[in-house]
Amino acid sequence: MKILAIETSCDETAAAILEGPEPGTMSQNPCLQLLSNVVVSQVDIFAAYGGVIPEIAARSHLEAILPVIHQALNDAHLHPQDLDAIAVTHAPGLLGSLLIGTLTARTLAILWQKPLFAVHHLKSHIYANWLPTASKSSLEKVPAFPLLALVISGGHTQIIYMPEHNHFEIIGTTRDDAIGECFDKVAKILGLPYPGGPSIAQCAKKGNQRKYPLPHPKVDDLDFSFSGLKTAVLRSVQNACDLDITTPSYELKKHLSAQQKADFAASFQATACDILIEKLELALERYPETKSLVFAGGVSANQALREKARQVFEKTQSGLNLRLFFPELQYTGDNAAMVATAAYFEIISGVQPTDPYKLNILPRTPIK
Ligand SMILES: Nc1ncnc2c1ncn2[C@@H]1O[C@H](COP(=O)(O)OP(=O)(O)OP(=O)(O)O)[C@@H](O)[C@H]1O
Ligand SMILES: [Mg+2]
């Protein structure tokens, strides 16, 4: 079956077509083929503002959505009548952005008479780990259940337990900022370009991660908190520059040398990674039956995190047969290939299509 997926939850307008075996031929590792994958990012527009402006994002989606879908069909050498289903991100995300994607998908589902599947954005980030890749061909290359997924993105920081396909239990979540948001805000303090995550990772390469010790939040259980870490960086920068705590954050960058910026980037990145790893260790103690540890979302592109996770879990947990999964770098940020993959596993798990006349967007709903 061929699925056209549409993603517009934030500032990427994306469409992709995925082909998989017909439902009923359930296998742990079905042979999936990505026929096309088109992403138009608005990152260049928002670099000038240092962040996403929802109204501009929605208007940009409106301009890009039909050409992007057209391109996805062309790249796959398909016509609308060749499609078996349409999938779309309906939650969570920016209200105006979600509206453009869902209204387009609903209209096409009605016009082309295709079943419509509504997909939660975090499901898609997790299912990026099932996307076919050149190096991923054998059975052991897809995650085994039960698994723990660490979703680390611009809007979320969660640990999710998955006993099987399409079943999600949130076992830890952030109580304030998301980790990606924290990378972006710290980058702003240091005067590094938007988006902050890749800028911090790049700048940290020349830095000393032990130069500026930063605190770990004291949050019980498997929950996270990142707003204190952001403030700790702010205070530490003010202190290193001999400035008063009332000095506004946007004035600090001009007082920092290139080496200080690198040292702050490295110290922050190392602390943020350690916080994630500590919580994953605790989660594995609570869920010792876990067979795979799956990373998902924009921050899972971070190489320092990948290295640290491999060091910690592949070494100490090898007796448990724990396997680690990271999405290919091109699938860590928002794209529609992951939406199509999530929809495929929804369909073969027996999820029924949604009524295109009734589908609502849900800007802040948790994964279910
Ligand atoms: N190499 C990296 N290291 C750390 N953070 C990164 C890296 N690359 C991207 N990021 C961060 O990932 C975030 C974007 O990820 P993503 O696109 O998954 O989030 P989003 O779609 O905005 O939010 P959500 O998925 O929660 O709705 C940004 O905060 C960005 O700074
Ligand atoms: Mg996202």
Image (spheres, grey):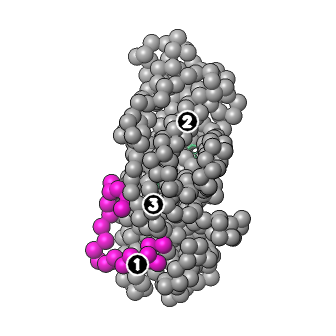
Dominant SS in magenta = loop
**Depth check: 348 or 156 in front?**
348
Query: Where 85 sits versus 94, above or below?
Result: below
Pointer 1 or 2: first along the chain? 2
Name the residue type under label 3: Met
Mark 3 or 2, closer to the camera: 3
Give the label, 3 or 1, closer to the camera: 3
Nearest to the observer: residue 219 or residue 122: 219
Distance (Cα) linking label 3 and label 1:
17 Å
Q: Which mark is residue 274?
A: 2
Name the residue rendered at 49%, 61% in the picture. 146
Circle 3 sits on which residue? 162
Mark number displayed over residue 350: 1
Quarter location, residue 138: bottom right
Q: Which residues are magenta?
A: 345-368
Work out whether residue 223 can be spotted: yes
Give the mark nearest the N terminus, 3 or 1.
3
Residue drawn at 63 percent across, 24 percent down: 210
How far across and down, in percent of the image, does residue 110 sit? 36, 82
Amino acid at circle 2: Asp
- Residue at 55% x, 77% y is 27
Q: What is the spatial separation of the Cα atoms under label 3 and label 2, in whole angstroms?
A: 23 Å
Residue 181 counted in the magenta span: no
